[in-house]
Image (cartoon, rainbow, N blue to C red):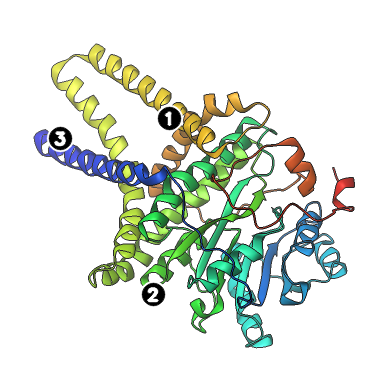
Amino acid sequence: MLDVIGWILQTIMVIGGIYGLYHIVIGLNSFGELKLPEPQPGEPQHRFAILVCAKNESTVIDQLLITIENLDYPRELYDVFVVADNCTDDTADICRKAGAFVYERTDAKRKGKGFAMKWFFERFLVDHAGRYDACVVFDADNVVEVGFLTALNTRFNAGESIVVGYRTGKNPSSSWVAGCSTLYWLLQTRFFHLPRNRFGWSLFSVSGTGFGFLLSVLDGKGWDTKTQCEDIEFTLNAIADGHRAVLEPRAVFFDEQPQGLWTSIKQRYRWALGGVQIVPICTPRLWRRVRSGDRKATDGLIYSVGLLVSAISGWCGMLFSVMLAARTGRWDLMVLAALVFGAFAYVFTGLFGWLTILLEDARWPGMWKTVLLFPLHLGIWWVLMLVALFYRDATWHDIPHTVRLSLSEIEAEHHTGRLTPLPRPNAGPKPDPEGTEAG
């Protein structure tokens, strides 16, 4: 019986190793330029609806609205829509005064961004039918560089239907947790998003914020996601429908990162739970697309299932080691092997984070703490993936946003990452007289 269990554990470990090797091979295509279409004179300009879902975001949302107002895109070609979701502060009033269309939602039972977006599109697609070509989604704590819509417009004109901006941290120096979260997004962009675009494949996630899509992607059905990871679910379903999501490094935005460890754990547990939830929902549709020979769908399917496999395989390796030590009586060798492997994994992950920082040309105060503790950050995520397999609490926990910085303050304090070489759509930000007094 133990032999059978051991064989099963080893099989799962091998599958997990193959999954890791798959991503390493793809990641080797991360070095080099990403060919980007250039804006053409007289090219069509899309009309954008910018959507922001906000719950009690009065502290930070004004900075997002200021940067949106200062975009270099023709002002008459975009409008801002804010879903004030179960708000008890003056978020709605602030947004109305800034000229946004405000939809106020009150639903204590259906909490979460996915529910809010579904509710919004049920109304938006009726109220504004045919007026807009595309939608861009931001979180209330974001701050946006001036060329964002210009860059997305160019990609839509090049035939893309889903475009993801370049995400980096707004507050990487505020704590080691925020720094590690910032580094994670930079790593995802460099080693997961970039190589897939160079292969002509799709990103596996629009990453929740800072992305845009043609409204035709919704196919008149609205926003219909059911999991805690509405961003991954939306992307994988779009892949199953024949679309692909592409990276646009010229569309830069800054995203507030959690400052406390417990806040980060609650947020990442929700993402881990969403990763478990998407498997039965998305994999059948992706499999049907795979059978038609779609490589984008194949990669999406491997990603969706592989998240679980990678989490399980690591724990299978630990269990197999314990079984082997119990059979041979050499507990000393097991402990020694665990220490050596743990030290190697820690150093390798730290060096991997450092390589990401070098490639992205990212610098911020206290960055050494980020590199030193980044392996711990990823290790916690690995544990949360396993927890989500056996403990599934779908309660939505709000993440507080308190870092109120203008675009000029962010760029002055932090030299945060971007893919190089990065064509710039303009010379710099427009004057931000209101934002410079923030802090």
- The tag earlier along the polypeptide, 3 or 2, is 3
Q: Which mark is residue 6?
A: 3
Q: In which quarter of the image is the C terminus?
A: top right
Q: Is mark 2 on a helix, strand or loop?
A: loop
Q: What element carries label 3?
A: helix
Residue at the top extreme of this rendering: 332
Three-letter amino acid code of the residue under disc 2: Asp
- The tag earlier along the polypeptide, 2 or 1, is 2
- Name the residue beneath numbered marker 1: 349
Q: Which mark is residue 419?
A: none
Q: In which quarter of the image is the N terminus?
A: top left
- Name the residue beneath numbered marker 2: 241
From the top left corner, tell me how far across and down residue 6 is, in percent: 15, 35
Residue appearing at x 89%, y 53% in the figure:
434
From the top left corner, tell me how far across and down residue 23 is, in percent: 33, 45
Three-letter amino acid code of the residue under disc 3: Gly
In the displayed structure, 381 sits above or below 227; it is above
Three-letter amino acid code of the residue under disc 1: Thr
